[in-house]
């Protein structure tokens, strides 16, 4: 049994979820079981459809009720986030999954769906061999300090600034 580490993918650049999905597919290719919990989002994005093709090794759950990034989250959004963290905590500690990905958990933190202390409690109580990956913009310093690996995606140039909207299979 090898030790599992804590990885954080953060920053304003594109690619945090994509990197986590790449790791999930790599892990599945090695026969590892993966749990992919996605906070805030609730739509069947192309990334979710792709992961469902590996349903024998990758379990996907979404803990969002719809996009509230342009408004304050409602009580039901906060409740869904908290319930999602409890569910993800069970997956982290279970020993069933070799890799647990908490996609957009940093966004959930920034919208106060749960606290960094609650997230760190779940991560610190994980099975010793469980590799944990947390993604999303605005990773708090406490999470960065606790992590074994932190990658910051930095936007240098993006076509969104020229009015290009999210495209199927590329951004969604």
Image (cartoon, grey):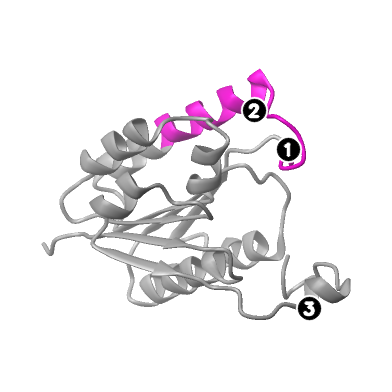
Question: SS for tag 3?
Answer: helix
Distance from Cα at disc 2 to Cα at disc 3: 30 Å
Query: Could you tell whether 134 is left or right of 41 in the image?
Result: left
Distance from Cα at disc 1 to Cα at disc 2: 8 Å
Q: Nearer the viewer, mark 1 or mark 2?
A: 1
Where is residue 67 drawn, in percent x and y?
74, 42
Name the residue that disc number 2 marks: 77
In the image, 53 versus 157, the foreground residue is 157
Question: SS for tag 1?
Answer: loop
Name the residue that disc number 3 marks: 159
Contact (Cβ within 8 Å) of mark 1 with mark 2: yes
Query: Could you tell whether 136 is left or right of 93 in the image?
Result: right
Distance from Cα at disc 3 to Cα at disc 1: 23 Å
Q: Is residue 163 above or below residue 111?
A: below
Residue found 25% across the figure and 40% down from its top? 93
Q: Is residue 97 above or below residue 76?
A: below
Q: Nearer the viewer, mark 2 or mark 3?
A: 3
Contact (Cβ within 8 Å) of mark 2 with mark 3: no
**Image quadrant containing the N terminus:** bottom left
Name the residue that disc number 1 marks: 68
Residue found 62% across the figure and 42% down from its top? 40
Q: Earlier in the sequence, mark 1 or mark 2?
A: 1
Q: What range is drawn magenta here?
A: 66-87
Residue found 73% across the figure and 49% down from its top? 43
Which class describes the residues within 10 Å of circle 1: few (<14), some (14-19), or many (20+)?
some
Residue found 36% across the figure and 37% down from its top? 119
Query: Which quarter of the figure has residue 9?
Result: bottom left
């Amino acid at each position: 049994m090898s030790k599992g580490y804590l990885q954080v993918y953060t920053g304003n650049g594109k690619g945090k979820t994509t990197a986590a999905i790449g790791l999930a597919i790599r892990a599945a290719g090695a026969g590892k079981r993966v749990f992919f919990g996605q906070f805030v989002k609730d739509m069947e994005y192309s990334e979710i459809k792709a992961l469902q093709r590996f349903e024998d090794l990758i379990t996907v759950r979404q803990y969002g009720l719809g996009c509230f990034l342009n408004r304050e989250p409602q009580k039901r959004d906060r409740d869904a986030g908290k319930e999602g963290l409890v569910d993800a905590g069970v997956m982290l500690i279970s020993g069933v999954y070799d890799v647990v990905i908490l996609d957009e958990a940093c966004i959930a933190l920034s919208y106060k769906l749960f606290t960094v202390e609650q997230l760190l409690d779940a991560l610190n109580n994980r099975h010793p061999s469980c590799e944990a990956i947390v993604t999303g913009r605005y990773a708090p310093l406490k999470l960065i300090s606790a992590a074994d690996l932190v990658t910051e995606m930095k936007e240098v140039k993006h076509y969104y600034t020229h009015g290009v909207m999210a495209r199927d299979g590329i951004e969604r």
